[in-house]
Image (spheres, rainbow, N blue to C red):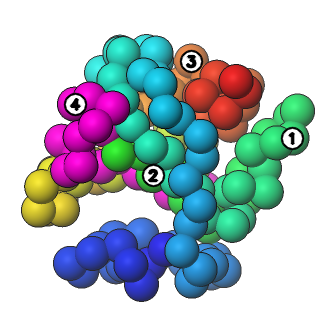
């Protein structure tokens, strides 16, 4: 994932003491619009997971290990090629941020992959607290 992530993005996703797979991630199924909460309400997208995160997705109780990376492309339509935004969640080591379940939220501009924000508190974390029982990850997209 890091090798094919784009212009300098590898440093953004580098997790301390994490073993991140260098294999290209497989997209998770999502051909239809994703109906989710808040800022992601009814939009198209492809969700990617590195090998560390993918191993947790099929479990009934999810606890994503350090180094898990989930990336979502936000698309305008089912035929869009260039995403409007790329949103990522990176699971950091314990104690990184109690306010976000040790997740870091990263937003990139879809057209040029420029960093728009990195946060552990704010709009992303506030919304994802609703998914605290699934380790801050909305899993309805995976459970179809």
Looking at the image, is mark 3 or mark 1 earlier in the sequence? 1
Identify the secondary structure beneath mark 4: loop
Vertical side of 69 occupied by 122: above or below: above
Please give the residue where the numbered disc 1 appears in the rendered image: 59
Residue at 35 percent of width and 73 percent of height = 5
Q: Taken as a whole, is the magenta stretch helix, strand or loop?
A: loop
Residue at 57 percent of width and 83 percent of height = 22
**Which stretch is magenta?**
74-97
Numbered mark located on residue 130 in the image: 3
Please give the residue where the numbered disc 4 appears in the rendered image: 76
Distance Cα–Cα, label 4 vs label 3: 25 Å
Looking at the image, is mark 2 or mark 1 earlier in the sequence? 1
Distance Cα–Cα, label 1 vs label 4: 30 Å
Vertical side of 128 occupied by 100: above or below: below
Distance Cα–Cα, label 3 vs label 2: 19 Å
Q: Please tell me which residue lies in front, 47 or 125.
A: 47
Q: Is residue 46 left or right of residue 19?
A: left
Identify the secondary structure beneath mark 3: helix
Label 2 vs label 4, nearer the camera = 4
């Amino acid at each position: 994932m890091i090798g094919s992530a784009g212009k300098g993005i590898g440093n953004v996703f580098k997790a301390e003491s994490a073993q991140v797979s260098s294999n290209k991630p497989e997209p998770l199924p999502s051909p239809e619009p994703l109906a989710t909460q808040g800022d992601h309400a009814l939009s198209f997208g492809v969700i990617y997971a590195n090998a560390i995160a993918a191993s947790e997705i099929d479990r009934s109780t999810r606890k994503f290990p350090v180094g898990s990376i989930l990336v979502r492309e936000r698309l305008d339509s089912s035929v869009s090629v260039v995403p409007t935004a790329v949103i990522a969640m990176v699971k950091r080591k314990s104690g990184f941020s109690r306010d976000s379940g040790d997740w870091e939220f990263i937003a990139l501009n879809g057209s040029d992959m420029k960093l728009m924000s990195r946060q552990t508190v704010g709009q992303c974390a506030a919304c994802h607290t609703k998914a605290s029982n699934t380790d801050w990850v909305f899993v309805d997209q995976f459970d179809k």
